[in-house]
Amino acid sequence: MKFFVDTANLDQIREAYEMGVLDGVTTNPSLMAKEGIKGEENCRKHYVAICELVDGDVSAEVIATDYQGMIREGEELAALHPNIVVKVPCIAEGIRAIKYFTDKGIRTNCTLVFSPGQALLAAKAGATYVSPFVGRLDDIASDGIELIEKIVDMYAYYGFKTQVLAASIRSTQHIIQCVEAGADVATCPLSAIKGLLNHPLTTSGLATFLADHRKVNS
Ligand code: G3P
């Protein structure tokens, strides 16, 4: 199970990397906007800055929605750094672009996936990763984790190599559910990753150990 952090914030990426368990980063246009990064050149500089912080895959999303535009943008993004994975929306032109990138040896992340059928097309086009959005399905009273289970089963049954990257993870509980569902990767807010550490028996047990040590050493 790989951990990616789902943010464009350099401090959070650095903190996650320093924890020693980070395998990569995902970004999207909304996360870039949240950091106030505007303009093509600044976005690209920011992607390079992220790549220099992390030894792992960094998803950078195309803005174009037409085939030629996606190809041009994706090739430019991929040329920025060897860690870049080109993130492409799951629309018809996007699937066609993923097939093109696959044939060129450029790694891709098919994003905005909400159904097994979309995940099937992404895998058939050769996507490196598929990103089903767990939290956004839960938001509309659907079942995001069930979608992860269905995609994991389908890929295993047919032997697809595409990795299931569970996205739109909102909580520590989501991470555990993704592990149980067999996701290859979860891209999470840093707070959800840190939440994995929380256990009251760890906190109380450590306090007791330290108190006992102090009793005989003071
Ligand atoms: O990068 C895609 C993603 O993880 C979106 O998350 O919380 O905006 O649904 P969220």
Image (cartoon, rainbow, N blue to C red):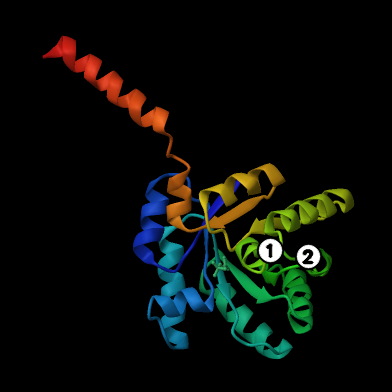
- Is residue 210 or residue 51 the one in the foreground? 210
Q: Which residue corresponds to mark 1?
A: 132
- Tell whether 132 sits left or right of 36: right
- Tell whether 49 sits left or right of 73: left
Could you say where residue 17 lies in the image, as x and y percent from the top left?
41, 52
Q: Which residue corresponds to mark 2?
A: 119
- Is residue 178 or residue 50 the one in the foreground? 178
For the point 47% across and 45% down, the residue is 21
Could you say where residue 23 lies in the image, as x and y percent from the top left?
53, 51
In the depicted structure, whether residue 129 falls above or below residue 37:
above
- Is residue 68 or residue 197 the one in the foreground? 197
| Disc 2 secondary structure class | helix
For the point 52% across and 54% down, the residue is 171
Q: Which comes sooner in the sequence, label 1 or label 2? A: 2
Look at the numbered discs 1 and 2 and tell me whether their residues touch, using CB distance below 8 Å: yes
| Disc 1 secondary structure class | strand
The answer to whether any part of residue 107 appears in the image is: no
Residue at far front of view = 141
In the depicted structure, whether residue 1 falls above or below residue 114:
above
Type of the residue with mark 2: Ala
Crowding at label 1, few (<14), some or many (≥20) Cα neighbours within 10 Å? many
Residue 23 numbered mark, or none: none
